[in-house]
Image (tube, rainbow, N blue to C red):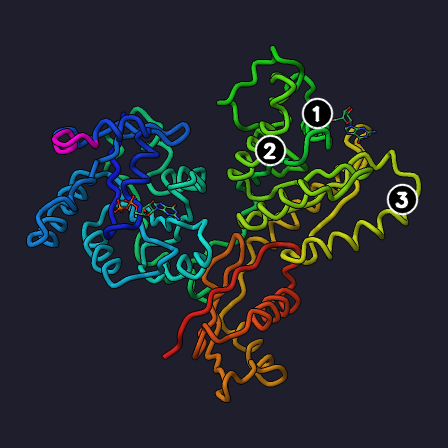
């Protein structure tokens, strides 16, 4: 069974780019030939294990300028009518535009399931735009970069969340009526954590982790030790393919889903490709994960590549946990540990308080502590602070450490609210966001982190103009 997806959004948000990615670049290039586009409007598309059809809305903008708006709207409406699911694209780099609201309104009125996609999320300053996307009332934005192929695993998950597993994977065509429409309310709920129906932290859901790190840090050994099944990881004939991407197991009653990493595959690959492969593949697995275990070789910790990997994980908004591996080889553990802790705080200030655990994958020591840290970090990453508490916190801040005056004018901060979790994201309403110094924003983030006990996870803050 297949379902149809329409990619909707104002011009220039990246619809064609996403279309090309989903439908396969070659196919789309062929279809760029004049005259072909309009005839072949439905293209097979793939997002990992999800197979569907994507409705081609490219080429609408080719219409004569005078009739452009009318025609675009008409074509958009046709595409929406045909679709089972809508990808509503906005441009996180540019931020929310009036046209986005117009298109969003058309989509909302259709009553079709929607996945709100914040494209160009890799761009500088996209964070603010992404938080603005909440205002559309179409639910939680999924940050992607259509151009660079980032965020696709989240898009996959969002499709399943919007349509349900059965509709996405099932054979049953009759599931149509049961589709839950994820609509307007979601955004409002989350913008106000005091509201009812906010999902609590769900212990029953599998906790998704990935293990990343430099070659030879001990990833495969660690995964083996955690899962306790040697058979998974031996040699090239083990039957581990690109498609077998996750392993489930149970840790003290907690369901864990481990996403495949380079460590599980690298042994099957030729030696000279090793480095490149393990980093890219590991990072790919990382995007499926909530918590990412960064394995460092404690005998040679914090090499440049280690830091690059950690930085990327934090930028991608995952919850990081550091495993200092090969601890059995360390001679003066107390001293080394103190040194490593100091380095961790200094080198990774973006996630101050990051959990770091010493382990020996080979002997199995420290694995319980590691998994404790994973669960703890996952909780923090999911944390939610009520608007009431946030604004009482803000009052204290404004009383004791108000924002500086810029060019003789006081900056005013009106209020703060948590717009998202996983990782925590906050919106601060401010009289002149562009004038608020970065150092002050960092101060706010650090104070939030301390006041509400959110160590070791990325925290995002967007500034919005208050009236
Ligand atoms: P459409 O009009 O909505 O179909 O948008 P296009 O796909 O033609 O993209 C508009 C512009 O945005 C092009 O210059 C793309 O290269 C650019 N673009 C698309 N996706 C991304 C992205 O993920 N990141 C960045 N930085 N630019 C993108
Ligand atoms: P990967 O490339 O990150 O998957 O690393 P491997 O798991 O293949 O491990 C690289 C090497 O380090 C192997 O020779 C392992 O036996 C060794 N190793 C892994 N973990 C430990 C550990 O905790 N202690 C010691 N002494 N050696 C380890």
Q: Looking at the rendering, in which quadrant would you find the N terminus?
A: top left
State how far apart marks 2 and 1 are (Cα).
Answer: 24 Å
Ranked by sequence position, the earlier of labels 2 and 1 is 1
Quadrant housing residue 404: bottom right
Q: Which residues are magenta?
A: 32-38
Query: Where is residue 256 drawn, in percent x and y?
Result: 60, 36
Q: Tell me if the residue at label 2 has its CB under 8 Å from ligand 2.
A: no
Q: Check disc 2 and report the residue beneath it.
A: 279
Q: Would you call the spot at circle 3 few (<14 residues within 10 Å), some (14-19), or many (20 or more)?
A: few
Task: Report the residue marked by disc 1.
Answer: 228
Front disc: 1 or 3: 3
Q: CA distance from mark 2 to mark 3?
A: 29 Å
Which residue corresponds to the image point at 64% horizontal and 56% vertical from the top-left? 351
Residue pointed to by mark 3 = 333
User: Is residue 119 a member of the stretch shown in magenta?
Assistant: no
Label 2, secondary structure: give it. helix
Q: CA distance from mark 1 to mark 3?
A: 26 Å
Disc 3, ligand 2: is the CB inside 8 Å? no
* 7 lies above or below 173: below
Residue 152 visible to the viewer? yes
């Amino acid at each position: 069974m297949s379902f149809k997806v329409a990619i909707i959004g104002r011009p220039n948000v990246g619809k064609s780019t996403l279309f090309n990615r989903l439908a396969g670049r070659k196919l789309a290039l062929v279809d760029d030939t004049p005259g072909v586009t309009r005839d072949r409007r439905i293209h097979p598309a793939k997002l990992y294990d999800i197979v569907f059809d994507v409705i081609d809305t490219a080429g609408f903008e080719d219409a004569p300028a005078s009739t452009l708006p009318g025609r675009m709207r008409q074509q958009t409406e046709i595409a929406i009518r045909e679709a089972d699911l809508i990808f509503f694209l906005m441009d996180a780099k540019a931020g929310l535009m009036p046209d986005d609201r117009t298109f969003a309104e058309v989509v909302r009125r259709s009553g079709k399931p929607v996945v709100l996609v914040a494209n160009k999320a890799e761009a500088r300053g996209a964070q603010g735009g992404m938080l603005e996307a909440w205002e559309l009332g179409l639910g939680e934005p999924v940050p992607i970069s259509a151009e660079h192929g980032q965020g696709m695993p989240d898009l996959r998950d969002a499709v399943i969340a919007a349509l349900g597993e059965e509709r996405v994977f099932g054979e049953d065509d009759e599931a149509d009526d049961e589709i839950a429409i994820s609509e307007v309310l979601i955004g409002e709920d989350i913008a106000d954590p005091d509201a009812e129906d906010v999902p609590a932290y769900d212990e029953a859901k599998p906790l998704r982790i990935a293990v990343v790190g430099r070659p030879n840090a001990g990833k495969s050994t660690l995964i083996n030790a955690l899962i306790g099944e040697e058979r998974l990881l031996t040699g090239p004939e083990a039957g581990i393919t690109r498609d077998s991407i996750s392993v489930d197991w149970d840790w003290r009653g907690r369901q864990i889903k481990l996403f495949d990493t380079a460590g599980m595959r690298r042994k099957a690959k030729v030696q000279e490709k090793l480095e490149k492969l393990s980093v890219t593949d590991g990072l790919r697995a990382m995007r499926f994960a909530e918590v990412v275990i960064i394995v460092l070789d404690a005998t040679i910790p914090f090499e440049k590549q280690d830091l690059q990997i950690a930085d990327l994980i934090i930028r991608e908004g995952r919850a990081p946990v550091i495993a200092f591996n090969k601890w059995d080889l360390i001679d003066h553990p107390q001293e080394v540990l103190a040194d490593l802790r100091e380095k961790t705080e200094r080198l990774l200030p973006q996630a101050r308080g990051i959990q770091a655990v010493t382990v020996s994958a080979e002997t199995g020591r420290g694995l319980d502590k590691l998994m404790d840290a994973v669960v703890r970090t996952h909780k923090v990453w999911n944390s939610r602070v009520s608007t009431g508490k946030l604004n009482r916190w803000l009052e204290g801040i404004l009383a004791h450490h108000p924002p500086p005056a810029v060019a003789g004018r006081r900056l005013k901060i009106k209020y703060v609210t948590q717009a998202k979790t996983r990782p925590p994201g906050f919106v601060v309403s401010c009289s002149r966001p562009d004038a608020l110094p970065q150092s002050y924003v960092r101060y706010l983030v650090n104070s939030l982190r301390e006041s509400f006990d959110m160590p070791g996870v990325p925290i995002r803050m967007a500034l919005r103009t208050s009236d």
